[in-house]
Image (cartoon, coloured by chain):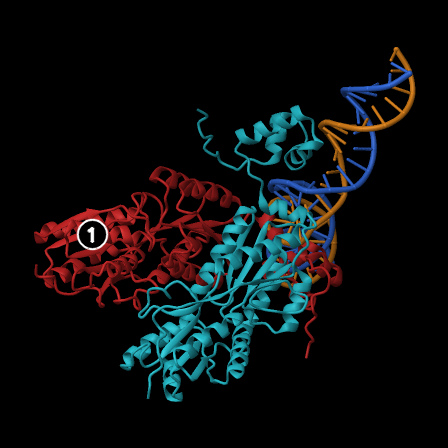
Chain colours: A cyan, B red, C orange, D blue
Amino acid sequence: MATQPMATGRPATIHDIAALCGVAASTVSRALANPERVNIRTRERIQAAAVELNYTPNSQAKALSSGRTGAVGVLVPDITNPFYFDLIRGTQLQLKAAGYTQLLVDTEESDEVEASTLEQLRKSADGVIVAASRLNDEALAAAAARMPMVTVNRDVDGVPAVIIDTPSAMPQALDHLISLGHTSVAYVSGPAVSQSSARRWTALSEAAEERGVEVRRIGPFAPKTQSGAAAADAAVHSGVTACIVFNDLIAIGMLQRLRERGLRVPEDMSIVGCDDIFGADFCNPPLTTMSSPIEQAGRVAVSMLLAQLNPLAGGGNRSRSVMPTHLTVRGSTGPARSN
Amino acid sequence: MATQPMATGRPATIHDIAALCGVAASTVSRALANPERVNIRTRERIQAAAVELNYTPNSQAKALSSGRTGAVGVLVPDITNPFYFDLIRGTQLQLKAAGYTQLLVDTEESDEVEASTLEQLRKSADGVIVAASRLNDEALAAAAARMPMVTVNRDVDGVPAVIIDTPSAMPQALDHLISLGHTSVAYVSGPAVSQSSARRWTALSEAAEERGVEVRRIGPFAPKTQSGAAAADAAVHSGVTACIVFNDLIAIGMLQRLRERGLRVPEDMSIVGCDDIFGADFCNPPLTTMSSPIEQAGRVAVSMLLAQLNPLAGGGNRSRSVMPTHLTVRGSTGPARSN
DNA sequence: ACGCATTTGACAACCGATTGCCATTAACTG
DNA sequence: CAGTTAATGGCAATCGGTTGTCAAATGCGT
């Protein structure tokens, strides 16, 4: 059995291989990159030497000379938001499968950090995936013009995007609540700059109008469980019997706050979340929510980006991919309080 | 107001700056790196030009010539485990503060992936932080000899480590259970290769012996909520009245399974988790668990690594940092069933 | 065995920065 | 004012690859 050559002092370079085989470094480079351009016997000698020396190409050098870095930046507003866990896992898996490296950056919900990161990444990554961008349309379009980009949950003209179509499930959610006898519903909105939140609200209010139900909007709230307390208080104060909440994080926070206040869910207040993140199924009560294929969205985003980067197969680069969503009913919704 | 020069076609290089200022490229490089080596007036001209051209150094080129990449690899066994998200957030924050880039890699609980990633990273990162390594001591020590490394929750001779001292809280947990009348306790163990799990078990069994309590061990189980079902069944079958579980993920899974089986927590079974991850406070019932300063552990790991990389200030490089842990009592523990 | 087409592989420039070395110039000493 | 020292900045090599160019070697047909 070939004993693992236990990488010696310095990693091997193509020059080491070239010396060992008695050829030029460029030949080695070709043998490894376009094998058909090199005599099969030489090639095999080179490949054997590469294995023997435990050669790994230096990605920096490769990037410098070829212009491609083999890395993809993934920007998320808040790395601790479980929603992004799933997204990141999706991108990570797909990127690794394609031999790319993932550069994960937390932009801390700041448009400035986001902008400067994008500028930085322009040279150290081949492309970027930007989730829930906090930039305005103009800045985002400008950035996309300068480097391959795919956005997630953000629609800007000319920028390929993966959209998790939570809005389309809003009517489902509303019908679910109406069927339980709710007539007074609140939408607990997310960050003011969030396009997702805006789209969800639009879809919900349209559905409400069609059905002749009153839906009021409260917020905005930061997408964190801590915001749930204020959101719960606002909801209670507004007198509604059910809430559709921008995301599960806030919804879970509301669950906790309502419990503290001695209010029962769903008897006194029904809660519907969005996203179906980790934890939505085991909180108390389990959260009725709009389930999203988040991890899949990450994978699709990567595929779309890679299609941009390697426009070989004319596989018709889709520039917009909509991920379906559906309502998952759990324990946080129930018949309206008959007061 | 200086209108943002809206980055033109190609990013500026030091050559552009040199040409604009009428000096050599090397002078520009020096002016930016060691300002004191360059005449103040020249320097200021250069710096002004750099700003005007919106210059950002090309990190690839810098890495190639200087040997330092400005990147740090962070290896975790499973990116979807919430435990690591707190860790990752800690490393991310601290790395960014120090101007480093984080290369996040999910090693998929595989020692092979871990090994090959380490070899790869050897050239593309200045150092690595390895959480819950699945490698054996030998391989890990060998890897650490080849590049700066800090481990998390893994103790190997000669490798700097951050240890979250959950074992030290084991007596607390056990006393808590004993005080509630439990005399028959199970330890639900994690992966067989996990040093953390082994250490926790050792600490627990020692504490049990001192106190004359019987503690049996069941498992091993994969650190996922899904494993909780089997773990719960095993625990019930073993007849214990309380479990101390390797981590919160499994514990939460057990909570769900016990509920399915019609068993009440804590009336029929008390559960103590480890880590205090996202979700431990809002599951049903809220989980009694060993709280760990996970994010802080990530920050400390980065600090230790950076101290290795820049051995300037003789700030006595600690090679081992132990993070304290304590028991957080919530609703999943209660008086023993008096059968 | 000769000439032509084709394959194969060596050479060298280049990517963008860093850095050792040296020449120039300025400033200071005696 | 000569001589020494220090400050300054330019040249060129280097990092590890990629890639265009071109000469040499090969194979083919006749």
Q: Point out the image quarter for the N terminus of chain B.
A: bottom right
Amino acid at the residue labelled 1: Ala
A53 up-or-down from A193: above or below: above
Image coords of residue A44 (percent x, y): 62, 26
Report the residue that reaches farthest toward the front: A179
B92 up-or-down from A288: above or below: above
B10 up-or-down from A21: above or below: below
Q: Is residue B92 left or right of residue B62?
A: left
Q: Residues within 10 Å of mark 1 (few under 14, many from 20)?
A: many
- The answer to which quarter of the image holds residue A133 is bottom right
According to the picture, the residue beneath numbered tag 1 turns out to be B235
Q: Depth check: B271 or A106 in front?
A: B271
Q: Is residue B217 left or right of residue B99?
A: left
Q: Residue at x 19, y 47 (%)?
A: B217
Q: Point out the image quarter for the C terminus of chain B.
A: bottom left
Q: Is residue B221 left or right of residue B217?
A: right
- The answer to which quarter of the image holds residue A185 is bottom left
Identify the secondary structure beneath mark 1.
Answer: helix
| Residue A122 can be seen in this image | yes
- The answer to which quarter of the image holds residue B167 is bottom left
Q: Chain of mark 1?
A: B
